[in-house]
Image (tube, coloured by chain):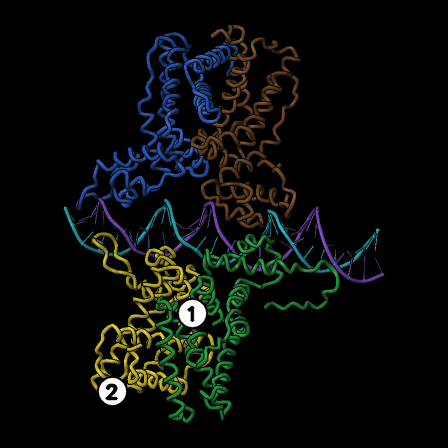
Chain colours: A yellow, B green, C blue, D brown, E cyan, F purple
Amino acid sequence: MQSRTPATPRTGRPRSAAADAAILAATREALVELGWSKLTLGDVATRAGVAKTTLYRRWSGKNELVVDAVAELFDELELPDRGSLAADIEGVVLQFAAILARPEAKSGLMAVVAESTRDDALRERIRASIVDPQKDLVLDGRARAQARGELPPETDPEEASRTVDLIFDVVAGAVVHRTLVSAEPADEEWVRSFTKVLLLGLTSAGSSNLSGI
Amino acid sequence: MQSRTPATPRTGRPRSAAADAAILAATREALVELGWSKLTLGDVATRAGVAKTTLYRRWSGKNELVVDAVAELFDELELPDRGSLAADIEGVVLQFAAILARPEAKSGLMAVVAESTRDDALRERIRASIVDPQKDLVLDGRARAQARGELPPETDPEEASRTVDLIFDVVAGAVVHRTLVSAEPADEEWVRSFTKVLLLGLTSAGSSNLSGI
Amino acid sequence: MQSRTPATPRTGRPRSAAADAAILAATREALVELGWSKLTLGDVATRAGVAKTTLYRRWSGKNELVVDAVAELFDELELPDRGSLAADIEGVVLQFAAILARPEAKSGLMAVVAESTRDDALRERIRASIVDPQKDLVLDGRARAQARGELPPETDPEEASRTVDLIFDVVAGAVVHRTLVSAEPADEEWVRSFTKVLLLGLTSAGSSNLSGI
Amino acid sequence: MQSRTPATPRTGRPRSAAADAAILAATREALVELGWSKLTLGDVATRAGVAKTTLYRRWSGKNELVVDAVAELFDELELPDRGSLAADIEGVVLQFAAILARPEAKSGLMAVVAESTRDDALRERIRASIVDPQKDLVLDGRARAQARGELPPETDPEEASRTVDLIFDVVAGAVVHRTLVSAEPADEEWVRSFTKVLLLGLTSAGSSNLSGI
DNA sequence: CTGTAATCGAGACGGTACGTCACGTCTTTAC
DNA sequence: GTAAAGACGTGACGTACCGTCTCGATTACAG
């Protein structure tokens, strides 16, 4: 989302709140129909029933717009309580895979990530609106597993942070690669296999002193 | 690679062989300087000292050209013999990470992958010239580990194939995500942690009947 | 001038009288700095410290606004009494040339005349606020010359009217063409030559029965 | 006309000669239908069956394009041989008035003159392609009158040049003002009156030592 | 040798989208 | 109800690349 608290926007006609939603919805629609490379801002504006200038007043370009449009897709991600760490992970990975399977996500997400390799502000925007919320789920999951006694409480906070980052890169990376590069569905069977390997690797590594590396 | 066997290439002036190399090199140069989105075929042609027509005679568009240009980067990947499965994996992952750290790879690879979500021919081209050669390294590594006795010979070929695919998605996905999304270096420390988790996960899973899932 | 008698201006905040003057002055300032084609109503409003709405409430567009702004420049024209017809003409032509030499007049006047070729209301506005006051000077000059005995009283009113029109087109046209197209100054020397030719032509024509053509 | 002798345009596809003519014709058509201010280059390109880029490759903007389009209208001006100076002048003034009466000339000419008050290059272009050819007609007319013995050969070249400039400003200015500002037709009757005044003024002035002013 | 034919660099061509600007209107709050 | 402020839909701007085409000028191989 673009920041929405200007200094003193007291006077003048206020920006239409409906326009924002219409534009983001139109962006997703266009991503489905046309894909990233054939999506044009003029077309999005038309679909949203909005003038091009209105769109440019709110977003500085295609990249930022698509980040916001795709980010909303991930808002529905939540950590289910399925009773065990393994089941919780499987659940959230399946949700993640389901979102990534949607064409508007496929089409847009990798493209903006590719663009972000040369645009720090864009990468920061992606991190803030897409990546960090996902990483929070990993943290929540760990906390819940610790409460259940499935995982020991962390002792070294820094090492724990590194482990979370590793888990996150492995999980998100594997699902994305499976979906986009291998072009195979990340279905229940695959997710179960993947989760098993991941959990065994982590718990074995933990018991064999992963942090001591 | 582009097809190089026209129907009746009997007569007429032959295509310049030097032009191909110059164009691919110019493409990588432009990727470094401009990135994917600002790379234009006209500019590549100019850099290569070649007319635009010459470029279009050989490649059908930006996507195909960049796939070929990036694929050459991965030609240097090879399976080192470091004496143990873990060390071999670490070595090849480090090589992979080193290539991915280069701006011409970062910029171009994810972009064409993003494009390939809506272009089957492009995805097939990426698979053939970039992905499959990498997967062959995994197969070679497994064969070598089996010869060493570190891994048992596979019994169920189909299940073995699924496992290779899983490994590949996990490895490539994790490195890519670490590099591009988290924007952190996949350095030796990270690779060692990652390899440890992966190997423990796989061997524990194997001994606990992963294939029985 | 714009109409200034709304139907029921009874209640509500009255229109600011100062705004009108500020807008016209800002218009002339913008004409000097930017010229006709780059003058924008938004910029004029800003210069005048006025909202765009206020400007549009008073003028219907750029053309009308500039006509009014330029018309005020010609208010300073007056018929000097230099003692002879020739000297009077020279005096008034010099005044006219001096106004036309100012950039706000140059820039704006010809532009609105050009626009008026396709806008009858605009031409009428120009005539009423710019042309007719000038033509009155010619009439005054003739009357004064007749009083002096330099010219005979007109006998045929219609023919006299045609002659005034002819004089007016010749005088105004020549000065404008000299200033804008030839881009040479209509200075004292030129005005003296021009006046001489004009007067000799008219008096000779009169004595040789111009009306008899 | 734009200059058409580049340094070494040897290679590459040559510019379409037909496009130039089509664009200029389309410009005049648009001037008639829409007038100067509503004429857009995109519309002209469409009318000419040409891409906008093709138009911009040849002309730098609306002003230059319209100057060239209008200049072609004046190509048909020529000095008729009607047997006497007065008749010759009347003939050429009538031709000039006839061209100015056409809507494409009315609409465009004054507008570019207005623009030229802030654009020296544009004024020079107007002079070279529109004004100077007309002035040549005045010179030809004088030469013919001298050959006939109607006018004495000039003695002082500089004074003669000033006289030609004065005549030209008076003639062109009067016709333009009559047509555009007064919005009355410069018909035969008017032209005869005007020519009579002009010629009497000039010959009387000559005999009364105009050059001595 | 001499055609014939596909190549080469160059650059104009018809398009499409860009991101910006000004238009004239509308919608707010403040006076 | 008018004021300032500024968002709105509209439409043209001038530019950049696209992928195709038309040039004259090289090459190679075939006869």
**Element assignment for label 2:** loop
Q: Which mark is residue B97?
A: 1
Q: Image quarter for residue B53?
A: bottom right
Residue underneath mark 2: A150
Residue B43 falls left or right of residue E8: left
What residue appears at the point 37 percent right and 26 percent down from the top-left corner?
C102
Q: Residue C68's x, y, as percent?
A: 33, 33
Of residues B149 and A146, the one nearer the viewer is: B149
Find the distance from the CA under tag 2 to the CA under tag 1. Answer: 33 Å
- Label 2 marks a residue whose chain is A
Q: Which amino acid does label 2 sit on?
A: Glu
Q: Which amino acid does label 1 sit on?
A: Ala
Query: Residue A85's image quarter?
Result: bottom left
- The residue positioned 55% from the left and 29% from the top of the image is D128
Q: Which residue lies furthest to the front in this view?
A: B83
User: Residue C23 in the image: x percent, y percent?
Assistant: 28, 37
